[in-house]
Amino acid sequence: MVNWKRLFSTISKVLSVLMIALLSLLSGCKFEGKDMKADLFFDAKMVSLLHAIQRKDSAAAKAMLAQGAELNVRGKEGITPLLWLIMQKDLSAVELALQLGAYPNFPAMIEINRTGPKPAQPLAIIAGDGDNQLFSLLLKYGASPDSRDESTGRPAIFGTIGHDNWQQFSLLLEYGVDINAKDRSNSNSALYAADLGKYDLVYKLINEGASATEPSTTGASVAWRVHLALEKNAKNPAFRVSEDTHKTKALLEERGVVFPPSTPQEVREALKQGQ
């Protein structure tokens, strides 16, 4: 005979894991989680606190916090109360949680592969295709513009570049983002944008102070990406390059970069020799 209670419990746990995994893969899906019930991740005490915050009942929420409830904790699958509220896309509830002491930089622990859970800060999780008002609210309450999602190995600014979210990108600049923050491959924002062929943004980032010469771990650089694009266009005019690609090359030459630049292999060899 089927044990329906046990089966339902197992299915619920599996669904919670899958939803968290999808949450981390923001490049492929919209950031929403309104169907994710709080009791999938938290005990009854925390569920009551979250529901009080959703009702905007600050008195009840404060009473629960005074009795030992804590907002800066992690539930099942590494999710935090603040992140759960963010997933509900309830701006006023998120703001109340922040006012009650939820730390905007407290990371969830997200696992998307077999390397184990990695810290992921809320701002970095929603960077790009997350709600712009929530993004702005987190910054207002102290979220670091340099927030990172180590499950992907990227800082928040990469998410805004990847999703062409110029409103979030501008907010990060306004709040003093490190324009040269790097991902696991040692690529900064300009090189990441060049990898995506977004030379309008590459040009802007270099003018904002992004390094155009520092290579990734593979030896690639912004100059090398520009060179490849223009070389491909020269060999095959059907392959079009934007005016911004030419502008970026001119800007690099103004700054002393010689074309053609060193190949990735040459760069790697030079790095090995300590040059």
Image: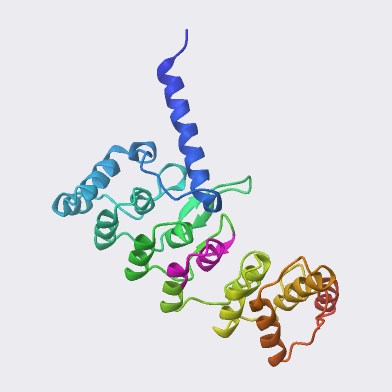
Q: Nearer the viewer, residue 2 or 168?
A: 168
Q: Is residue 154 magenta?
A: yes
Residue furthest out toward the left: 59
Q: Residue at coordinates 66% horizontally, 70% vertically from top-left?
A: 194
Q: Residue at coordinates 63% horizontally, 74% vertically from top-left?
A: 199
Q: Residue at coordinates 52% horizontally, 50% vertically from top-left?
A: 24
Query: Vertical placement of 39 versus 247: above or below?
Result: above
Residue 135 in the image, given as x and y percentages of width and height: 39, 63
The residues colored magenta run 153-169
Q: Nearer the viewer, residue 87 or 256?
A: 256
Main SS, magenta region, reads: helix
Q: Quadrant of residue 217?
A: bottom right
Residue 263 in the image, given as x and y percentages of width and height: 83, 74
Q: Does residue 1 appear left or right of residue 86 in this picture?
A: right
Q: Does residue 100 appear left or right of residue 117 in this picture?
A: left
Query: Vertical placement of 252 versus 173: above or below?
Result: below
Coloring scheme of the render? rainbow
